[in-house]
Image (cartoon, rainbow, N blue to C red):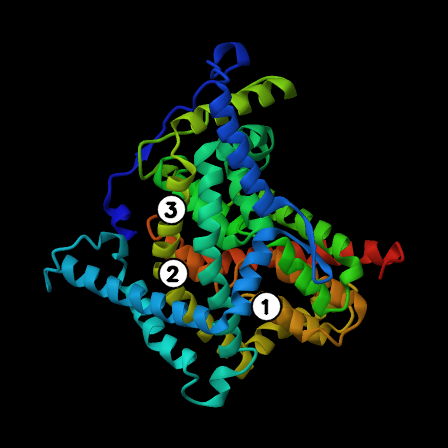
Amino acid sequence: MSTQSEQPTRTVDVEPEARTLDEVELSEFDARHVLKFVVAFGIGAFFFLLPVPWQGEITVPFDIVVSRITASFPNAVGVYALAIIVAGGLLTTLAELDTRDVLDVGVDFSYWESSVAFWALRIAGLLLAPVMFFKLGPGWLHTASTGQFMWSTLVYSVGVIIPIGAVFITIFVELGGLEFVGTLARPLMRPLFNLPGRAALDSLASWVGSYSVGLYVTRNVFERGGYHKRDVFTIATCFSTVSIGFVGVVAATLNMLELFPIIFLAYFLCVGICGVILVRIPPISDVPKEYIDEPDPEHPFEGSGFDYLRFAVSEAVEKAEEGETFLEAAWRGFVDGLKLTSLILGTILAVGLAATLLSAHTPVFDYLGAPLVPVVRALGIPNAETVAPATIVGITEMYVPVLLVTGAAVKAKFFVAVLSVSQLIFFSSVGPMAMDMFSDVPIRFRDLVLLFVMRTIILVPVIAGMTHVVAALGLL
């Protein structure tokens, strides 16, 4: 993907003028094309949006499929993860040797070209994957909170989520879903978050599926000129959210499942508040509005709610008419998903394992959290000595703060539950994934650390206030 950083970038100097329904050419509602869009939309909505009861919780079919595969075939998933990480490291090495004229492979491996740093990380992943698969080395490397968690939970999940999610999200996106959701979301996304309406689909894919699927959508739209670099940076750092299902896991871990709706509502508000603020200040506001392909910005539209609906359906049907068949879209999505997985899974393993080992075996986060103890105490949150490190350690993995407060007071548990899922940026997965997928933006390590700190500064007093309100209502 890094080859795109070498391509000339394009900018749009003048924003298109707003149009009304009378000024746009609506598609003819041919029954075949309408049906094609409706079926594609229905498939995507069923897979990602339909709430269904499963093992005592409410989730979506996508989560059930991924969970069933990883739980029922752990050995097969392990072999697959090992193979695709090794393949990613080898293909990157061949691409880099070819680029440097060390070896003429005679095959186009440009997709796997990378920076030296991410080449090194993919090689580290290649070397670590057999160690994790065969459980080699010292026992502390394979504990439940470090190696076992990274390999059997995160690597397995991300490795399965991306190609399966890519199949259904490609059907949804390529056959009209992106245009439909994006058009309806324009009045919300642009004024609040300085994003095109189509970005709502990326966020929705993260909410109901996985941040991996959301970033996959972002990558695809970016490569087609639908987003400029600031759009991508904003989506990756503000809207690559944890899924509804994971919020349920957090609530269950803290024995607060009965408060799941309140925790999720607080989380939803926190993501929105951070997004409104952070898109308007550096480092996000400093990212250039450059496209890596022919720009395809959204044209502003003015009209009533019904006008928006008619325009959204028209745009969706036109896309369905131009789009591939269901099988073509599904196969392309699966292949693209496998290629993307080979790029990022080794990086996730290398960076995530280092982050979790740092958290589990060093006192660094206790030291970093110490200055926050009086702040947490002043905000009226109990167990400040436990909560303060939990506000910092989330940069390694979002689930670690939750494990730190399982024995704390209920107000402390509520505070950390909402904070841990609202900080978004963590280096066991989403951080290295975003940096590797969008090296042409670029999303840099220092920017992610800065944004994590900024989000935490915003969220700590906001969530403390929410905690006291919920307690005052007698719910805690």
The residue that mark 2 highlights is 344
Residue 162, quarter of the rendered image: bottom left
Amino acid marked by disc 2:
Ile
Sequence-wise first label, 3 or 1? 3
Residue at (81% x, 57% y) in the render: 468
In whole angstroms, how far apart are the C-alphas of marks 1 and 2? 25 Å
Q: Which residue is mark 3?
A: 331
Residue at horizontal 80 percent and vertical 68 percent from the top = 410
Q: CA distance from mark 2 to mark 3?
A: 20 Å
Residue 370 percent coordinates (x, y): 63, 75
The location of residue 451, given as percent across then percent down, is: 52, 55
Q: Are marks 2 and 3 in contact (CB under 8 Å)?
A: no
Q: Position of residue 179 (x, y in %)?
A: 49, 30
In the image: residue 207, left or right of residue 472: left
Q: Residues within 10 Å of mark 2 (few under 14, many from 20)?
A: many
Amino acid carrying mark 3 in the image? Trp
Name of the residue lying farthest toward the top: 22
Number of numbered discs visible in the structure rendering? 3
